[in-house]
Image (cartoon, rainbow, N blue to C red):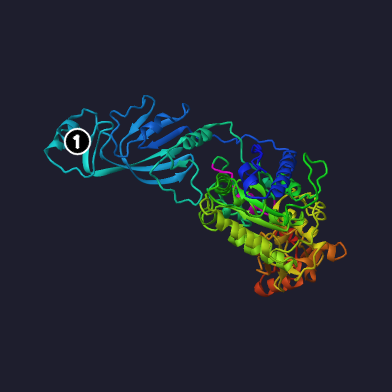
């Protein structure tokens, strides 16, 4: 198919050249129709971006580049850091730019407070009299700003300074800015520090301008009331904090998680790691991605913009989550090479879903694609040099998910591919090898439309959160497969609880659990595998260290395997009732332990041991005595 197709505004499509030149005509035609319908389905999902609600300061430092400093937005308060350069006659309008002397020695901090350590041979006592410029060695002293080259040798010329501002040993000072543009700088953060720009181009000017905009839209939708980070000082889930490559997530306290939406770079690492759905991307939400995937694998569309024959020119159906940065550029390059005749490039017609970064893709996305009827899933990204997360960001995910699909009886169905723009044949060979190993999926297409929930769980977690969405997809898959194991390995956000005899049936674990997966019923401690997100709070917070959590999905603990009952008894204990009011104090074993540890824990006026009374009655007894 050689007819031109404009790229859709959703960014879902591969460029025309890829469709027209790397697939045969039938496959390219059908794939184009699927892409049009998928884009339409994605646009049906409401997306209302909200203001970021946070204002970044206006101070911007530009290191050593006068032209770039002059080109900064008018709203910026710009400082040009000389970095040893001479700006006496640079041909740039620096009338609104403050010029600071010094060479950059160190950079530290984050957006809103980036500190530059500068070293200069002239102190702030300088009055710009230019005596040192006239008397000093040739090319050793700059005029604008006045500074001395570190290689300059001393001599009588130093004595001409009327304020003794020359110090050849060097004087260091620290200055702070909201943003820094440092063309020669190096950023150690895997995904780059927001507000610290190391390129000198129009994209940098646009990035600076965007961060200065007080009305810019937030990349994130947050529902922090369902966050599983913890309570009462106990540290629970910290998945988003560990995943963020841009320091946009912080932990002010062990039980708190805070998002700096100004520093967010829209990679989606936090959203794919969050088990509860507390955070989602505003522009490429999980629900929108779900609708696009379902439309792509719909072999007989009903109500789509375009229809096609049932000849199945796209077979097998491989859903590809494609990074919108380098990976998409590489695929475009392959089409250009084929169209120009420079390379004969051909590979199976994958069905692309644009993601901001492969960091966006988690187990829920892959499981949903398989539940929707995809034969396989490829994650197509930057590989060993991800623009956000650094080396091999998805190797561990692919390994886990292939373990899970194998346990589910489907075999390995997931791969990560990193297309090199200059190596189209290597990509084609790797993709073809993956496709050749696949068998037809046992799961029919066209039947599953995700609701984004776990269907039977009575909880308040948002739809399309990773755990509930994953569980919904697994339940769909289980309708068509025979699992090889009862406990499915490789799946995060699913935990199984075991409790030792040390359990005193205190309410701690029940109170700490953020999803209501633990409850006490009389002398029984009960656990809901369906509700648990494996945050670990119960294990770390248990005062008796009686709880052990293991990661994995135990199919036998789901309610559909237990006559609809989601609750499993994990510990039974005889309860001790308060001597005075009859309220439950704790388990009998706990009371006996306390009596043994505190043999003197009683008063002459009190019958029995103080451990045999509830908290309220203890208070009354002590007060009345």
**Residue 359's spot in the image, x, y percent?**
60, 52
Q: Quadrant of residue 4?
A: top right
**Which image quarter is the C terminus in?**
bottom right
Residue at the image position 19 percent from the left and 35 percent from the top:
164
Depth check: 590 or 503 in front?
A: 503
Q: Nearer the viewer, residue 321 or 221?
A: 321
Q: Residue furthest front?
A: 341
Front one among 203 and 597: 203
Would residue 548 be found to the left or right of residue 108 on screen? right
Whether the magenta-drawn stretch holds residue 100 is answered as no
| Image quarter hosting the N terminus | top right
State whether residue 62 is above or below residue 278. above
Provide residue 235's location: percent of width, then percent of height: 61, 57
Element under label 1?
loop
Residue 1 vertical position relative to residue 517 in the rendered view, above or below: above
Q: Is residue 308 visible?
A: yes
Quarter residue 162 falls in: top left
Residue 306 as seen in the image, left or right of residue 333: right
Residue that label 1 marks: 164
Residue 506 at x, y percent in the picture = 72, 64
- The front one of 135 and 161 is 135
**Residue at the (31%, 39%) spot, across then down:** 102
Quick one: label 1, few (<14), some, or many (20+) residues within 10 Å? few
Res. 504 in view: no
Q: Which residues are magenta?
A: 263-276
Dominant secondary structure (helix, strand or loop) of the stretch shown in magenta: loop
Relative placement, left or right, of 543 versus 294 is: left
Where is residue 127 shown, x and y percent of the image? Answer: 24, 29
């Amino acid at each position: 198919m050689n007819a031109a197709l404009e790229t859709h505004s959703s960014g879902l499509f591969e460029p025309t050249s890829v469709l027209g030149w790397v697939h045969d005509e039938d496959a390219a035609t059908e794939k184009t129709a699927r892409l049009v319908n998928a884009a339409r389905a994605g646009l049906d999902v409401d997306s209302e971006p909200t203001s970021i609600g946070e204002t970044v300061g206006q101070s911007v430092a530009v290191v050593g580049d006068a032209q770039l400093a002059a080109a900064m937005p008018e709203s910026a308060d710009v400082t040009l850091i000389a970095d040893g350069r001479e700006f006496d006659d640079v041909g740039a309008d620096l009338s609104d730019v403050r010029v600071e002397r010094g060479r950059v020695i160190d950079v530290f901090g984050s957006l809103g407070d980036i500190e530059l350590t500068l070293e200069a041979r002239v102190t702030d006592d300088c009055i710009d009299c230019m005596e040192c410029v006239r008397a000093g060695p040739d090319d050793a002293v700059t005029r604008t700003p006045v500074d001395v080259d570190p290689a300059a040798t001393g001599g009588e010329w130093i004595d001409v300074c009327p304020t003794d501002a020359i110090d050849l040993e060097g004087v260091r000072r620290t200055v702070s800015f909201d943003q820094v543009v440092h063309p020669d700088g190096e950023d150690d953060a895997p995904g780059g520090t927001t507000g610290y720009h190391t390129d000198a181009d129009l994209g940098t000017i646009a990035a600076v301008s965007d961060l200065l905009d007080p009305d810019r839209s937030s990349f994130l939708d947050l529902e922090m009331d369902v966050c599983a980070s913890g309570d009462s000082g106990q540290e629970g889930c910290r998945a988003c904090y560990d995943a963020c490559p841009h320091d946009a997530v912080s932990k002010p306290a062990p039980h708190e998680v805070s998002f700096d939406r100004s520093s967010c770079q829209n990679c989606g690492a936090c959203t794919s790691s969050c088990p509860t759905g507390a955070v989602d991307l505003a522009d490429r939400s999980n629900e929108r991605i779900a609708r696009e995937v379902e439309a792509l694998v719909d072999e007989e569309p009903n109500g789509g913009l375009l229809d096609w024959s049932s000849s199945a020119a796209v077979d097998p159906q491989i859903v590809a989550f494609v990074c919108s940065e380098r990976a998409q550029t590489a695929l475009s390059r392959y089409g250009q090479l084929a169209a120009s005749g420079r390379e004969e490039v051909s590979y199976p017609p994958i069905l692309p879903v644009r993601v901001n970064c492969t960091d966006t893709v988690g187990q829920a996305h892959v499981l949903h694609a398989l539940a929707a009827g995809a034969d396989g899933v490829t994650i197509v990204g930057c590989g060993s040099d991800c623009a956000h997360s650094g080396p091999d960001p998805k190797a561990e995910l692919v390994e886990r998910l292939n373990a899970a699909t194998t346990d589910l009886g489907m075999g390995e169905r997931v791969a990560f591919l990193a297309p090199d723009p200059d190596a189209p044949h290597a990509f084609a060979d790797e993709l073809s090898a993956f496709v050749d190993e696949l068998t037809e999926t046992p799961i029919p297409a066209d039947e599953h439309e995700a609701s984004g929930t776990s269907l039977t769980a009575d909880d308040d977690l948002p739809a399309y959160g990773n755990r509930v969405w994953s569980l919904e997809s697994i339940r769909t898959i289980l309708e068509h497969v025979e699992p090889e194991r009862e406990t499915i390995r490789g799946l995060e956000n699913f935990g199984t609880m075991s409790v030792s005899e040390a359990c005193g049936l205190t309410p701690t674990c029940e109170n700490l659990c953020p999803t209501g997966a633990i409850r006490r019923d009389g002398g029984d401690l009960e656990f809901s595998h369906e509700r648990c997100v494996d945050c670990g709070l119960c294990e770390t917070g248990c005062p008796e260290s009686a709880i052990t959590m293991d990661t994995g999905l135990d199919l036998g603990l789901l309610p559909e395997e237990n006559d609809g009952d989601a609750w499993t008894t994990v510990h039974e204990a005889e309860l001790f009732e308060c001597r005075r009011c009859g309220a439950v104090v704790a388990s009998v074993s706990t009371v006996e332990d306390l009596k043994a540890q505190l043999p003197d824990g009683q008063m002459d006026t009190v019958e029995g041991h103080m451990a045999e009374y509830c908290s309220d009655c203890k208070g009354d007894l002590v007060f009345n005595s």
